[in-house]
Image (spheres, rainbow, N blue to C red):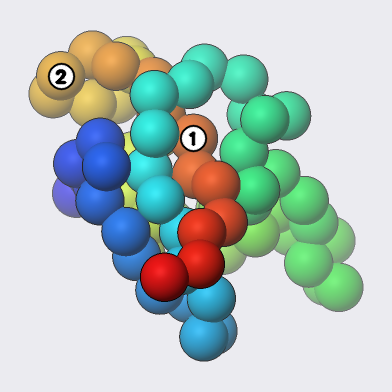
């Protein structure tokens, strides 16, 4: 599964937008949970593929927090 560029998802009451990007460090999900696992790995079913090599459109994406 992969998110479309521009798509907005909600996780734990917050909204995030999928945008073009390559650096994990620029992604809002690039942090570790209390248990030491990366948030993006723990929520991969919701977030979907982000690396260009794993996406059909071959475009790397990151997520940013948005308010709507």
Mark 1: which secondary structure? strand
Lateral position of residue 12 relative to residue 47, left or right: right
Q: Earlier in the sequence, mark 2 or mark 1?
A: 2
Provide the residue designation for mark 1: 62
**Mark 2 Cα within 10 Å, few/some/many (few <14, many 20+)?**
few
Residue in the image at 56% along x and 63% along y: 42
**Mark 1 Cα within 10 Å, few/some/many (few <14, many 20+)?**
many
**Residue 28 in view (yes/no):** yes
Q: Nearer the viewer, residue 63 or 31?
A: 63
**Residue 43 in view (yes/no):** no
Most extreme residue toward the front is 68
Lateral position of residue 54 relative to residue 12, left or right: left
Most extreme residue toward the left is 56
Residue in the image at 41% along x and 70% along y: 68
Residue in the image at 65% along x and 59% along y: 39
Query: Relative to 67, is 4 above or below?
Result: above
- Find residue 24 and report its horizontal and vertical position in percent: 64, 29
Total residue callouts: 2
Q: Nearer the viewer, residue 4 or 6?
A: 6
- Find residue 35 and report its horizontal and vertical position in percent: 83, 71
- Find residue 43 and report its horizontal and vertical position in percent: 49, 64
Query: Relative to 23, is 30 above or below?
Result: below
Check residue 57 in the rendering and tell me which mark sits there, or answer none.
2
Residue in the image at 70% along x and 53% along y: 38
* CA–CA distance in space, label 2 to label 1: 14 Å
Residue 54 occupies which quadrant of the picture?
A: top left
- Find residue 62 and report its horizontal and vertical position in percent: 49, 35
């Amino acid at each position: 599964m992969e998110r479309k560029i521009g798509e907005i998802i909600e996780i734990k009451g917050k909204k995030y937008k999928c945008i073009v990007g390559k650096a994990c460090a620029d992604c809002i999900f690039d942090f570790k949970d209390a248990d030491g696992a990366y948030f993006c790995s723990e929520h991969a079913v919701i977030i979907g593929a982000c690396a260009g090599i794993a996406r059909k459109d071959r475009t790397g994406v990151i997520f940013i927090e948005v308010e709507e």
